[in-house]
Image: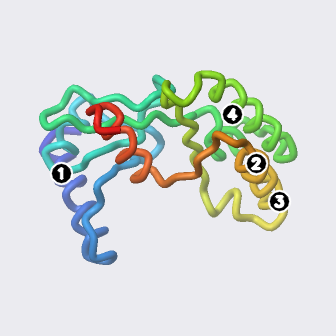
Amino acid sequence: MAPDVIRSHVRACLDTLEAVSGTRPTGWIGQDFGQSAGTPQILADEGVRWMADWANDEQPYPMNTQPAILSIPVLSELDDVQLLWHRRVATPRYPGLIAEAYEVLSRGGATSARVMVLGLHAWLFGMAHRIRYLDEAMERIAAQPDAWAATLGQLADWSQNKLSGED
């Protein structure tokens, strides 16, 4: 897709969300982890401060854009659509998989700012026969003394403060 077409779509999405919510979004999660190499700069040009589309790290980092926007990595392998729908992993296995991933990621300590962003979709995990497994997974994580349940916006604010030395 040509950059001007991408820019038009991004602007239309941001404008629509602002019109219905009264607030312009400061973050971006693209459809199916898909974007062009130029999309981060287009997002930065449109005032987006963070994006959660790249599964290439476990720590937030600034993208090479002007102005810089923050990349908040996602665990695409544990996205519910990837895991339960495409790969057909049995839903009862979900709490154990999430707990194991959290255990490994939390070994880095509080100074490494490792994150565990999980993609969840109401049409899939919101089903009555699945929701108990999501509840179980979240309860297991929330019981950990170093766990922090945060929105992506909160995580972006914390990470940007940490990266700029304001923390």
Residue 35 spot, x, y in % from top left:
33, 37
* For the residues bearing labels 4 and 2, Cβ distance under 8 angstroms: no
Q: Quadrant of the C terminus?
A: top left
**Mark before the other along the chain sequence, 4 or 3:** 4
Q: Which residue does the image show at 71% across and 50% down from the upper left?
A: 142
Residue 54 placement: quadrant? top left
Above or below for 99 versus 81? above
Q: Which residue does the image show at 81% across and 53% down from the upper left?
A: 136
> What's the CA distance linking mark 4 and mark 3?
19 Å
Above or below for 97 versus 80? above
Q: Which residue is mark 3?
A: 132
Residue 76 placement: quadrant? top right
Q: Which residue is mark 2?
A: 143
> What's the CA distance linking mark 2 and mark 1?
36 Å
What is the three-letter code of the residue carrying label 1?
Gly
Residue 85 spot, x, y in % from top left:
70, 45
Secondary structure beneath label 1 = loop
Q: Which residue is mark 1?
A: 47
- Label 3: how many residues lie within 10 Å, few (<14), some (14-19) or many (20+)? some
Mark nearest the camera among 4 and 3 is 4
Residue 57 spot, x, y in % from top left:
47, 24
Secondary structure beneath label 2 = loop
* Extreme-right residue of the structure: 92
**Mark before the other along the chain sequence, 2 or 3:** 3
